Amino acid sequence: MKRFWGYLAVMGLLAALSASPALGDTYFIYEQYGGTWHDANKTAANTEDDLMCWAAAASNILAWGHWGTATYNTADLIFKHFQDHWTDNTGFISWGLAWWIYGFEPGYKSISYVDVPGGGNFYPQLKLNFNYYYVGASEGNLMATIDSLMHQGKCVGLSIGSSSGSHALTAWGFEYTSPGAYTSIFFTDSDDGLPGLRQYALVWRNNAWYLGTKLDGYGGYSLTGWKINSVQALGYLHTPIAPSWVLFGTGVFSLFLCRRRRRGKS
């Protein structure tokens, strides 16, 4: 009799497991290429960086890829360097990367621009085209693009948008149930007020990817319903040399603007 009831228990467990949704696999760029996620955050104590999510995302990308210097060797220090030299306004992450690497400055001042000279330009021998690989939501499956970029060793920035504005995030990984079947995305956000890896479900709608249900334990504001508009990435720099660095495997994607920091933090 005990064997009979044991058999029924095992069969019941197997039936329950077969009826449950399949658990997804995850991919994180730092598990394949080293390092960890970075999360430069805006400063609640002042209003000098309220609109600089584009610079925060660029700082994360630069820090992970070892594009820093002896002085600016963390995402927060890199972000502070942006704050010290750029106006607090919306901007393009491609401009930030180009300024950091070879000293590019925008030619107009309707959005963020360099108001304090003498910063950036840490790799002047490099002239990268930061617009060449622009990929927007209308041009294809952006999650497939993110997947491909990360597997190539490129840290990916996201431009997301909604009716309330636009925002920049830094992606670090994703969850999937089978190749091409993406279920959630992991990112860091300069507006959430804490260092932490966020996770949102993904929704495919009208030939575009949207952020769905918030899956992490953070109880702050929500980005549910925001559309992934474009992506940008910069490759990993493996071998530093003095006085600058040797480029190794770079790739750059897209531009994105930043939305104003959420209420209560300005």
Image: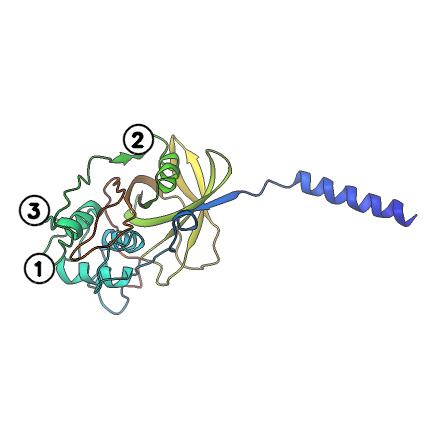
Which label sits in the foreground, 3 or 1?
A: 1
Q: Secondary structure at mark 3?
A: loop
- The residue lying at 28 percent from left, 59 percent from top is 75
Contact (Cβ within 8 Å) of mark 2 with mark 1: no
Q: Is residue 185 left or right of residue 2?
A: left
Label 3 environment density (alpha carbons within 10 Å; few <14, some 14–19, many ≥20): few
Residue bearing mark 2: 138
Q: Check disc 3 and give the amino acid type.
A: Tyr
Which residue is most to the right?
Answer: 1
Which label sits in the foreground, 2 or 1?
A: 1
Residue bearing mark 3: 108
Residue bearing mark 1: 118
Label 2 environment density (alpha carbons within 10 Å; few <14, some 14–19, many ≥20): few
- The residue lying at 44 percent from left, 48 percent from top is 200
- The residue lying at 16 percent from left, 47 percent from top is 98
Label 1 environment density (alpha carbons within 10 Å; few <14, some 14–19, many ≥20): few
Residue 259 coordinates in the image, percent (x, y): 26, 51
Which residue is most to the bottom?
Answer: 45
